Amino acid sequence: MRGLLLNNYYSLQNNIKSSLGIALLLSLVSFAGVDHSVLNAVIAAQIWIFVLSIGASLQMDEASKWNRFELTMPIRRRTVIHAKYLSFLMLILMGSAVSLVTLALTYVSKGDIAHLNLSTGYTFGLSLSISTLAIYYPVILKFGVEKSEQMVMISAGLAVGLRFLVWMLLNLYMDDVNYNGPETGYATLLLAVLLFAVSYLISVRIHRNKEF
């Protein structure tokens, strides 16, 4: 497992550095005197931007024939998928960690930030990232990495659509639910986590039946 995680990290390393640089630059928006809606957008973008690097990693694995080589090691196919999904979670955690820089800089520039409602940025960023990966990886595993970059954007679009669907459903049973409100955010995040778990099980099944 450790070797698989290290390989995933090395294949992502350059893209992680690029994502980190962009995310840190976004943190400087804190000094521009923007309102909480812009800060929420920045936090969501910082979390999600790390997910964009996954396509390049999978393409690198395909080009190096790593997908075939790892099957020669004394490991179960479930372990291979387990390592991939742990790597996905690590990317999301990296984005979440960088978002704390935004909070720190906002505190330095504004002082007390307790009155700012920044939960939307986190629920949106986390649900978007988790849903994107949950939709993206089983499809790429099944059909190949040739269209991986386009598939990332399609998966992100479907993830946004998922949030819209949750918002519409909540409005059927509750009054005046806001698209960017906490009810929509937490419900979408919960659904994204469930989708991630289902995605893992689907990916294990695909990998077991796939001939590399």
Image: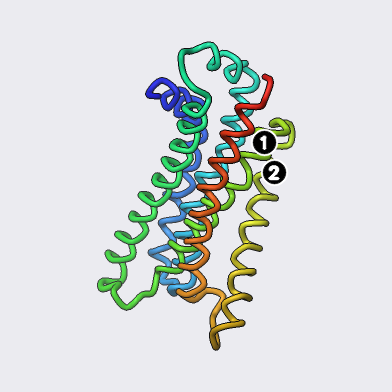
Q: Residue at x 52, y 51 (%)?
A: 130
Mark positioned earlier in the residue sequence (2 or 1) = 1
Viewer-nearest residue: 118 or 28 = 118
Q: Please state if 64 lies on the left or on the right of 20 as rendered.
A: right
Q: Residue at x 57, y 44 (%)?
A: 199
* Position above or below: 95 against 209: below
Q: How is the image coloured?
A: rainbow
Element assignment for label 2? helix
The crowd level at tag 2 (other Cα within 10 Å; few <14, some 14-19, many 20+) is some
- C-beta proximity under 8 Å, tags 2 and 1: yes
Q: Residue at x 62, y 61 (%)?
A: 160
- Viewport quadrant of the N terminus: top left
Element assignment for label 1? helix
* Position above or below: 171 against 191: below
The crowd level at tag 1 (other Cα within 10 Å; few <14, some 14-19, many 20+) is some
Q: Position of residue 87 (x, y in %)?
A: 45, 36
Which numbered mark, 2 or 1, is in the foreground of this view? 1
Viewer-nearest residue: 24 or 141 = 141
Q: Amino acid at mark 1?
A: Ile
Q: Please state if 146 lies on the left or on the right of 68 as rendered.
A: right
Residue ID for mark 2: 151
Q: Amino acid at mark 2?
A: Met
Residue ID for mark 1: 140
Q: Position of residue 198 (x, y in %)?
A: 55, 47
Q: Please state if 162 lies on the left or on the right of 16 as rendered.
A: right
